[in-house]
Amino acid sequence: MLWQRVLTALVLVPLVVASILLLDTPAVAGILGAIVLLGADEMARLANLEHGASRLLFVAVVALLLALAWLFVVPDLLAPLQWAMTAWWLLVTAALVARRRELIRVDGRRPAILALGGLVLVVAWASVVGLHAAAPGGPILVLFLFVLIWVADSGAYFAGRAFGRTKLSPFVSPGKTWAGAFGALAGAVIAATALVAGDWAGGASLPSLVLLCLLVTVVSIGGDLWESRLKREAGVKDSGRLLPGHGGVLDRVDSLLAAAPVFAVGAGLIGAAT
């Protein structure tokens, strides 16, 4: 219900903003890590792991990977993973938008989804944590990434409601329209302009930041579509029931999972993270 979504957002948004800006990187890493582990449990469900022990084992593996990433992954090691995920998300987005075949339910365990889902969760977490720790403006950039996703989602919602006629990917997510996608892109331009106007963009120019935000918004749509595909193949409406009116954790962070590595590597390239 709409009122549940609004109430949940009113509670969560101030907590997210305060955590990003006021806490140090280890604390932010711990909070995000807990969220990732909740998402890992939902990912196991979407991969058709029904037994609690199997899902707990997958969550434990993801927790181990997070710990190893915290201890040993340095920027030089993270960057190739971010580039690989950027390429993958671009391909997935294009493939899901172009898809014109019905999705059918997939029975049985799906080890490929488990492996890919674990990689997506860990790389996104490491990208946000690494960005938060980068330079004095790291927390501002992390907050901007979150705001960018929120603004793009809002732009997509209102543009889709007002002008949406042609479906973006009817067999994957029938509710999404091309008008909504363009509304999300318009929101990205507004967000980039605001960041530069506030002198929070580091050494990045407005044109380069706009291009990066447009790219990040495109892949964030792909992240949303990818999770929609997993849910359809698993035969479920939501990834979970943790958040009233919003579904599960993955339902709230699907766009961020795709956007985080792309934004992190792009921010370094254009000088926003310096």
Image (cartoon, helix red, strand yellow):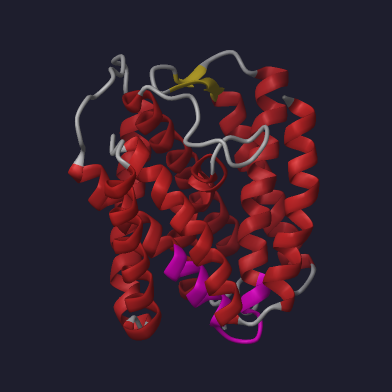
Regarding residue 68, the answer to whether it shows in the image is yes
Residue 227 position within the rendered picture, expressed as x and y whole percent measured from the top left: 42, 37
Vertical comparison of 11 with 14: above or below: above
Instruction: Please say if 79 is above or below 90.
Output: below
Q: How many marks?
A: 0
Specify whether 43 is left or right of 238: left
- On the question of residue 201 being in view, the answer is no
Q: Which residues are magenta?
A: 125-140
Residue 129 image point, x, y percent: 51, 73
Reply above or below: 189 against 184. below
The residue at the point 78 percent across, 50 percent down is: 11
Relative placement, left or right, of 109 versus 40 is left
Q: Residue at x 56, y 32 (%)?
A: 181
Q: Is residue 121 magenta?
A: no
Q: Main secondary structure of the magenta part?
A: helix
Q: Which is nearer the eye, 265 or 227?
A: 227
Task: State the quadrant of the N terminus.
Answer: top right
| Residue 223 picture location, percent across and down | 44, 43
Q: Residue at x 67, y 36 (%)?
A: 244
How far across and down, in percent of the image, does residue 238 sit?
50, 30
| Quarter occupied by residue 274 | bottom right
Q: Nearer the viewer, residue 194 or 53?
A: 53
Residue 85 horizontal side relative to residue 13, left or right:
left
Q: Is residue 90 left or right of residue 240?
A: left
* Residue for point 54% across, 49% down: 214
Is 112 drawn above or below residue 37 in the view shown? above
Residue 248, quarter of picture: top right
